[in-house]
Image (cartoon, rainbow, N blue to C red):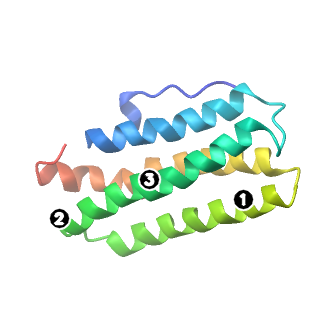
Amino acid sequence: MEQIIWSEDLSVGVKLFDEQHKVLIAMINKLINDPAATTMSETVSDILTEMTLYAQQHFKSEEDLMIEYGYPHFDEHRSQHIAFRKKVIELCTSAAGGADVVPQVLLEYLKEWMTQHILCEDMEYKQFFKEKGVW
Ligand SMILES: [Fe+2]
């Protein structure tokens, strides 16, 4: 599978968020680079840790800025972040239980998150923050 290379097409217009999104892309690439990774592998445990941090730090950055500027779609956006947080807990539980599908589920979920969340939901705030002069 091809690595994902960040380009301006992926930019949501806010520098900090682009940098944080690159971290998510790095997670996807790490999984792509290690197709034989098992649930008990270092790759999978690293990704689960990174996803936990990502959900704490990056989502907080987005949500704080949305609150500060009164983003009109905050509630819907936040509910997607909550779903991601729940998914991370679910995947950690599956991994701890030894479910062998974890690496595949992780890769699919992160790719889907990139296309469904970053490229759709996050792109929706691009114009909003631009108009507010945030970049
Ligand atoms: Fe988001």
Q: Which of 50 and 63 is in front in this view?
A: 50
The span from disc 3 to disc 2 (Cα, nearest Å) is 20 Å
Q: Which amino acid does label 2 sit on?
A: Tyr
The percent position of residue 47, horizontal first and vertical second, equals: 64, 43
Q: Mark 1 points at which residue?
A: 91
The percent position of residue 83, horizontal first and vertical second, equals: 56, 68
Q: Which of 21 and 123 is in front in this view?
A: 21
Mark 3 or 1, nearer chain start: 1
Q: Residue 100 — which label?
A: none
Residue 83's place in the image compared with 103, above or below, is below
Mark 3 or 2, nearer chain start: 2
- In the rendered view, does 124 fall on the left or right side of 117? left
Q: Name the residue under label 2.
A: 69
Q: Name the residue under label 3.
A: 120
The percent position of residue 53, horizontal first and vertical second, equals: 50, 51
Q: Quadrant of the C terminus?
A: top left
Q: Which residue is drawn at 39% across and 33% down?
A: 9
Discs 1/2, front: 1
Q: What residue type is labelled 1?
A: Leu
Tell me the crowding category of disc 1: few under 14, some 14 to 19, or many 20 or more residues within 10 angstroms, Cα based.
some
**Please, what secondary structure does the residue beneath circle 2 have?**
helix
Q: In which quarter of the image is the N terminus?
A: top right
